Image: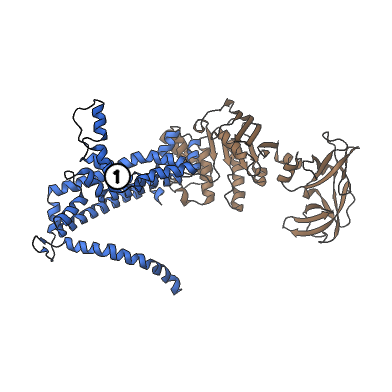
Amino acid sequence: MLMRSAAPWLLLAVPLAIFAALFVLPLGNMLLLSLQSFDRTTGATGGFTLNNYTKFLGDSFYLGILWRTLKLAALTTCVTLILGYPVAFHLNLSSGRRRAHLTLLILAPLLISVVVRSFGWLVILGPNGLVNSALRGAGVISEPLRLLYTESAIVLGLTHVFLSFMVLSIATALGRIDPAVVRAAQSLGANPVQTFLRVILPLSLPGIAAGSLIVFTLSMSAFITPVLLGGPRVKVMSYLAYQQTLLLSDWPYGSAIAFVLLALTAVSVLLYLRALETGRFRMVFR
Amino acid sequence: MATVELEGVSKFYGAHRAVHEFSLSIASGESVALLGPSGCGKTTTLNMIGGFLEPDAGHIRIAGRAVGGVPPYRRNIGMVFQHYALFPHLTVADNLAFGLRMRRASKAEIVRRVGGVLELVHLGGLERRYPRELSGGQQQRVALARALVVEPAVLLLDEPLSNLDAKLRQEMRQEIVELQQRLGITTIFVTHDQEEALAIAGRIAVMDAGRIEQVGAPEAIYGSPRTEFVARFIGEANLLPGEVLGPVRDGLAVRADLGARVLAPADAGFKAGDRVLVMVRPEKIYLGVAGSGTAENRIEATVRSVSFLGAVTRCLLTAGAQPLIVTTGEASGLPAAGQRAALEWNSRDCRLLAETRAC
């Protein structure tokens, strides 16, 4: 009996230890750090202060970056959802070899390093890049469009990276729908559009929820893609934390920024889940 | 309510013939069972009537209107699925209202009709529940109510009772029969359970390998099967191979392979020299140690086992290599295992079938 009750904990011991050592401890350390003040000559000074947080929340520059990060993550989530749903729907209709090939195709972007992928977009979107030269060649524009180092470029880059997560989440949920339920809707007089809106879409909500959570949290904390495609002008929270910590060595303020980002992500996710679980179609999530 | 006609309907899956030249006319208000083993094409046929599959050949008419190319949502059908297929994200009330909303019924009418159908299937008080909060029997009722509430031209049932336990199945059988008769709705249901078909249907179409083997009232199908397949599939049957000797008095004489001379009812389909099977239902045979001498046909066999099953006692016997089954209401006075016994039956209780397999 003792063996049986101890066994799960023994099995979990190693992962728990790794998790504690590599995640919980540094995070706790960062939290303490974010509550200390900083001196340019001596570094973190110890003690306890909320100055870092009041500095962040009292400055419209920083709040602007916080808002932009949230906005870009939300936009990326919406774009991947809109682009990903039809793909997932199609994927779910195919089977066998074709399904395997499509899945591989959808996962293909993940096989390439995020840096290489973002450089690809630099080549495509740059002033002399593919898009601008093509448009100029066609005589549509005379001056190159500013495509790079914009918020749109960041959303584009993030969408490219995270679309596969959305597609696979939704396809999984669609695959769980009993085909007989769809036929039941048809037998009751629902045309294809009504069947989709009233049956398929609500029943795929768990996939939409899972995909959105993955894409949103990854977009909130994305670093390389926003830095490369947004440049120094279009900053996001992760870059701000990096800048304060590694470029300016202000570890306490960098930690505070990271915690604001973490808190915002956590609150957004919790509000989103709560909305889904108390909403009209809450039964789908049980 | 409407008539349903199928005329030479065929469906192929590649080279496989799922349904072949299926023709059947179903009267308004009639209840018909498509009965057969799995893979006989009965579900394919139902799906073609429902519009989920298009026939490769032939025509289907519902209420006199050809429905070729008409999608399911314009056929005005009500369908009950094997696993109920209730909408898991909707309450019982919303499940029932679904079809009415699709038909743009007014709010007041939806409330009235949903309330009415809930009463009809004895589910009052459960309208706020979700499907997964219901028992199997309750889900079955909701599925039935959901199909009935739209007042469809035809009610299609796909193995509707196969997921219920034995006792509940009996109850639901009775309820379906009563509902069907009360509403007078044309009903077509698919089942592989012969007892279910016998209990519910006004007429049974026995199917095998995509074809109709026999169509008729349950009593006719059971009492006078026309083929060996039907005789074996519906109930139990003793099938004695033999050869027709020729007409005698008011019947046909048959020389059974196991040695006895058997008298069967006159049948224009057979002449002297034809190979036949003499079919006798197990309950039509009188079993005794000595025999009564009153019946026209008599063979002797050795009792292999006697099992008391409550209402009936089932005896397995062999006459040479020929296995025989006898069921009787008598629980005492039966021969014991190992004993010789006499089996007797009247000529009017047996039927001649064409022998389909080589012996």
In-image side of A146 versus A96 (left or right): left
- Give x and y (percent) for residue A260: 20, 54
Asked which quadrant contains residue B175, the reply is top right
Q: Which residue is mark 1?
A: A117
In-image side of B328 versus B157 (left or right): right
Along the line of sight, which residue is nearer the eye, A68 or B167?
A68
Residue at image location 27% in from the left, 63% down from the top? A24
Q: Quadrant of the C terminus of chain B?
A: top right
Residue at image location 44% in from the left, 43% down from the top? A101
Considering only vertical position in the picture, is B152 above or below B87? above
Q: Would you say residue B233 is visible in this rendering?
A: yes
Q: Chain of mark 1?
A: A
- Give x and y (percent) for residue B13: 59, 36
- Give x and y (percent) for residue B228: 75, 42
Asked which quadrant contains residue B2, the reply is top right
Q: Alpha-carbon neighbours of circle 1 within 10 Å: few (<14), some, or many (≥20)?
A: some
Considering only vertical position in the picture, is A54 above or below A107? below
Residue at image location 79% in from the left, 43% down from the top? B358
Q: How is the image coloured?
A: by chain
Q: Would you say residue B93 is visible in this rendering?
A: no
Looking at the colours in the rendered structure, which chain would you say is drawn in brown?
B
- Give x and y (percent) for residue B9: 63, 31
Looking at the colours in the rendered structure, which chain would you say is drawn in blue?
A
Residue type highlighted by circle 1: Arg
Q: Quadrant of the N terminus of chain B?
A: top right
